[in-house]
């Protein structure tokens, strides 16, 4: 069953779905590009790993992200094994780091494997100032923009700080930007309102070769269908944070017949 949204579905932005969606989106983009660019080029996935603080609970096996730590006083007598301890400690639920794996896509020239185009699909940590992944991404983006590599950034997250176009981005929930190596410092921008379809965007190859084409709306619809998100999302619930504008909220209510 397809998503009721004509473009990006904001319900997929909730954390329990996003990592799965992000990985499948990268894989689908790779498959679409490889159907167009071989044998002169090929697209491959580029994994990167970051860390996220999680809270561990002994009473449950899954991990959740904490807002605060929790301390517990242990009533006497306290036993360590079979031995009574006169002075009981305070037990705490501790924060640990959880590995988060994300994927990007690279287009390389066959033979010498020269990097031609880098495609980044932003994740929440990329847009969170202060997180290691935020600064790592900014450094990577800076290095790419100083190179001879084309750079395509796909931002399908309403939350967080806009990274590539901090001062120039239109005020829309989603945005795609393309920096061609032979056209810098100019960039192409596709602002995407919540109620709009996702665009079909060009993907530049080596100089002199025609662009590949990325039908993002078609790709996202395929990922939604194959991922079974209609069975995982309760559209009776509010759209996950950040909050919608009044106009967006009214449109969503109408779309979902609420």
Image: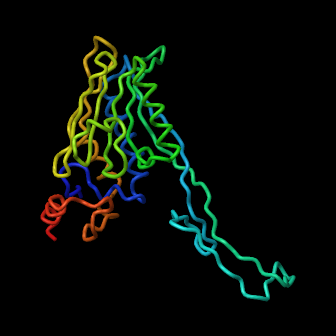
Q: Is residue 22 left or right of residue 213?
A: right
Residue ID at (19%, 47%): 193
Residue ID at (82%, 78%): 80
Q: Is residue 90 left or right of residue 7?
A: right
Residue ID at (14%, 59%): 247
- Kindly indicate the quadrant of the structure image that contains residue 244: bottom left
Q: Quadrant of the C terminus?
A: bottom left
**Furthest-right residue in view?**
83
Q: How many marks?
A: 0
Q: Is residue 226 above or below residue 49?
A: below
Q: How is the image coloured?
A: rainbow
- Kindly indicate the quadrant of the structure image that contains residue 257: bottom left
- Residue 226 lies, in percent from the top left, at 33, 51
**Furthest-top residue in view?**
208
- Which residue is nearer to you in this view: 38 or 238? 238
- Residue 60 lies, in percent from the top left, at 58, 72
Q: Quadrant of the N terminus?
A: bottom left
Residue ID at (33%, 61%): 241
- Residue 18 lies, in percent from the top left, at 39, 53
- Which residue is nearer to you in this view: 83 or 248? 248
Q: Is residue 83 above or below residue 15?
A: below
- Kindly indicate the quadrant of the structure image that contains residue 217: top left
């Amino acid at each position: 069953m397809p998503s009721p949204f004509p473009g990006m579905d904001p319900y997929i932005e909730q954390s329990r779905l996003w990592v799965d969606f992000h990985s499948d989106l990268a894989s689908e983009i790779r498959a679409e590009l490889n159907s167009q660019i071989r044998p002169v080029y090929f697209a491959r996935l580029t994994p990167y790993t970051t860390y996220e603080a999680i809270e561990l609970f002994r009473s449950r096996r899954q991990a959740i992200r904490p807002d605060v730590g929790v301390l517990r006083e242990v009533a006497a007598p306290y036993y360590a094994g079979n031995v009574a301890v006169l002075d009981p400690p305070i037990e705490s639920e501790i924060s640990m780091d959880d590995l988060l794996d994300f994927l990007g896509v690279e287009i390389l020239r066959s033979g010498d494997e020269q990097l031609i185009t880098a495609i980044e699909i932003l994740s929440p940590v990329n847009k969170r100032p202060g997180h290691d992944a935020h600064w790592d991404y900014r450094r990577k983006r800076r290095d790419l923009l100083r190179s001879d590599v084309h750079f395509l950034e796909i931002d399908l997250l309403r939350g967080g700080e806009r990274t590539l176009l901090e001062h120039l981005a239109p005020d829309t929930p989603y945005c795609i930007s393309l920096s061609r190596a032979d056209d810098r410092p100019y960039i192409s921008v596709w602002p995407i309102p919540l109620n709009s379809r996702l665009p079909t965007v060009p993907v530049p190859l080596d100089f002199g070769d025609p662009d590949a084409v990325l039908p993002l709306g078609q790709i996202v619809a395929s990922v939604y269908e194959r991922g079974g998100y209609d069975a995982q999302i309760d559209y009776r619930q509010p759209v996950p944070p950040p909050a919608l504008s009044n106009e967006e909220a009214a449109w969503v209510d109408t779309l979902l017949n609420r």
